[in-house]
Amino acid sequence: MPVPMLFMALGIALLAVDPVAQMPRLTIKGHTKVVNAVDFSPNGKLLASASDDDTVRIVDPTTGHLQRTLKGHTDSVLAVVFSPDNAKIATASADHTAKVWDAESGKLLLTLTGHQDSINSVKFSPDGESIATGSDDDTVKLWDVSTGKEKGELKGHTDSVNSVAFSPDGKVLVSGSSDDTVRCWNLETRKLIRKLKGHTDTVNSVAFSPDGSLLASAGHDETIRLWDAADGSPDATLGGHNGPVKALAFSHDGTLLATASDDGAAKIWDLSDNAEAAAFQGHADWLNDVVFSPDDTQLATASDDTTVKLWIIPEPKPAAADKKNTPEKKAPEKPAVIDKKTTTEKKPTTEKKPKK
């Protein structure tokens, strides 16, 4: 077997960046179908995964041992998230409902009904008092966590809403859609602030940086786009995946961005220069989600191969202490970083995600 093929078989990517790709620390099995989403509890003691087998599995991320299984949805569970205080878990499903569970006991607390189609995304507000959901019915809904009652609806997208995210101050909600746009909403007025255009295909994932200054979006057009959260102006476009980018997440210190793709790889980007810093390969199928551990030392990924994998994030190499005594090295070529302001991109031929 040729050396490059051998490396790929072992899960090692050949990169033009340093450090090289990493191998998984732990592979967690148990789901019987596609794993759609994964999330760490804020205290790092639990890891939740959501699957097409209609369940959510809660494990100890240190050992991978199962703690409990949440059963109640009657169709694929498409999203899962912990509340900021570790006390609750919210899930979203193709059965048109979202549910809220007690994280400690696994008891079902609330079922949120109102969407007319699959719910693709669910998020707690920063204060933990509200929940936002995005659905294939093209709407975003807001819910009261204490009562389970609908608080409002955001309309404007013309296709499925695949991802929602609250700003760190809880004043803005952003949504990504199969209509190829990202929309920012004022949560006090429930009005659209702005519509961000740039992706040439379905927007699969959106997220705010921890300080709220940046907005990131991942698309079926194989790109990651960074936007100024204050005015919506494009900051940069990152190219490096060879398939639709399904998910993204900022590190908690705001210095890194992780992405997951149908090309089977997760990548980490250094936001100081938007360069690819590491790649993680080892799944046997598409990746659907990626998340940092609370201490930013590990990455969790969810895949169509029915597993969740945990990866150690490599520490950056320290800068040379004395440049006088260090031979000058040619800087490695960076992955494509496309400035939308000056570059026109051709629309990929990737098919748009069909509505469920």
Image (cartoon, rainbow, N blue to C red):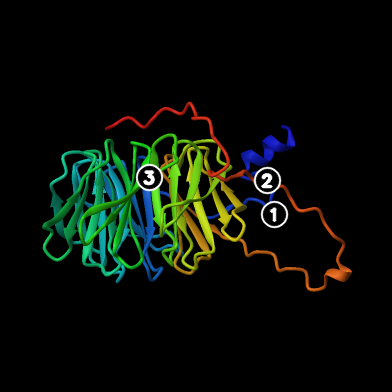
Mark in the foreground, 3 or 2: 2
Mark in the foreground, 1 or 3: 1
- Place residue 338 in its image quadrant: top right
223 relative to 105 in the view: left or right: right
On the question of residue 307 being in view, the answer is yes
Give the residue at x 82% y 73%.
322
**Residue carrying label 2:** 15
**Residue carrying label 3:** 35
Q: Position of residue 25 (x, y in %)?
A: 54, 57
Residue 18 is tagged as 1
251 relative to 8 in the view: left or right: left
- Marks 1 and 2 close (CB-CB < 8 Å): yes
Judge the density around disc 2: few (<14), some (14-19), many (≥20) Cα neighbours within 10 Å. some
**Residue kind at label 1, given as amino acid type:** Asp
| C-alpha distance separating marks 1 and 3 | 30 Å
**Residue kind at label 3, given as amino acid type:** Val
Q: Earlier in the sequence, mark 3 or mark 2?
A: 2
Say which element carries label 2.
Answer: loop
Judge the density around disc 1: few (<14), some (14-19), many (≥20) Cα neighbours within 10 Å. few
Give the residue at x 20% y 38%.
117
> Is 58 rendered above or below residue 53?
below
Say which element carries label 1.
Answer: loop
Q: Nearer the viewer, residue 204 or 183?
A: 183
- Marks 1 and 3 close (CB-CB < 8 Å): no
Residue 234 is tagged as none
Q: Nearer the viewer, residue 209 or 119?
A: 209
